[in-house]
Image (spheres, rainbow, N blue to C red):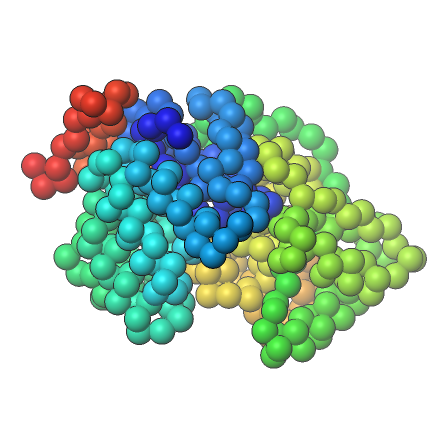
Amino acid sequence: MKKVDAYLCGYYGMENSGDDALLYATAWGVRKYLQAESVTVSSSQSHQLTGFGGTPPSQSTRQRFRGHRRLQQYRAAFNSSCVVFGGGSVFHTAQDISIKRHLLRLSRGSNHYAMGVGLGPFKNTAAEKACAKFLNESRFTGLRDPASYELAKSIAPRANLMLTFDLAPLLLAQTVRPLREVPRAGIAVSLCPIFEAQGEVQQTALLKDLADSLRSIYQTTGEVIYLLDFNGHSSFGDVKIHQTLKAMLGDAIPVRHIPYEPDPIAVLQRMHQFKLVVGMRLHASILAYLAGTPTVVLEYHSKCRGWGEQIGLSERYRFATNEFDGSLFKAQVLAGLENSFSMPKLSVRRAISLSEGNWSNEYVSKKSEIYSGHSSLQQVSAYN
């Protein structure tokens, strides 16, 4: 494996549109702010990244022996000058966080970053302690939401931390493929499965109430229902739950199932075509917001609640999945379709600026430059 400027780490290559967007934004950031000319991606898939072209898989799709993929991660880190964790909730278990710390040590450089990440929930105290060590060893960590920032400060008060924003708005900082204006039509629904036993019971109740509401909304408005897979993974994806909802909706109304799309810009363009997005997947809600599309958020996780609070989304458009009120949901959607929806208080322009804060801060842009040619690599300390 040839030496590269940056090793990009995240849940990449898992057929998740949200993580695809985070990878795209991370690659843009390391090129613009770290002057990286070559990257490796922690993925078992190849990726086409603006400015870098095609990046081959760095990991095997299947493990040949125990620890195989871990060794591949170590190899990729060893051959890089910088490790960047780009977006997502990537800190949960002690073992996984320990592996991330190993990557920092194995890299040929000493400037490593975590950008736009969320923390927790930690599996146990050992995971929390491991995360504190990681935060202290990372040169800079940008936390995407206030809850993550406060948690990070509490466990690692001396680390270089900053409250920033999710990375996804940086999709709009790149003008390679601007969004096209298209007529808006239809209601898109992006759900995600809940795997815990208790969650499965709640999921069934949610789907029934949601199906009844959407059926009634169609009968009133004639708006076609689109079921949008944000995760196409064979085991953890959205196909099954959307098929279940489709069956509950019945054959009397038109329902269109849209499969996973690996190009995040194409997904963003697609979100631009709907009159409304009902988002349970966090980044379905985020990309709909970026596309200027009204959104109803189904809050199954604290990160979904945090997102609604960050952008100033009206409480009218936020529904806890374990207390879903189908009648209220229907009333709010019908009112919005008839009279227009109130939009979030935070402007998209401001969201882009906050997202760019992951990179354009004193710990990164002013004091950190990656130079091509590892034999003469120059790096500047964050404390200079």
Name the foreground residue: 126 vs 61: 61
Residue 20, how many percent across, how many down?
53, 41
Q: Is residue 89 above or below residue 203?
A: above
Tell which residue pokes out farthest to the right in this image. Answer: 252
Name the foreground residue: 372 vs 162: 372
Q: Residue at x 14, y 32 (%)?
A: 380
Q: Residue at x 82, y 51 (%)?
A: 255
Residue 199, how many percent across, how many down?
61, 74
Tell which residue pokes out farthest to the front in this image. Answer: 65
Q: Residue at x 73, y 59 (%)?
A: 240
Name the foreground residue: 322 vs 33: 33
Residue 372 image-quadrant placement: top left
Quarter of the N terminus within the rendering: top left
Residue 88, how many percent across, how many down?
44, 51
Q: Is residue 88 visible?
A: no
Q: Is residue 224 left or right of residue 173?
A: right
Q: Is residue 235 left or right of residue 39?
A: right
How many numbered badges does the structure rendering display?
0
Q: Residue at x 84, y 62 (%)?
A: 247
Q: Is residue 180 left or right of residue 248?
A: left
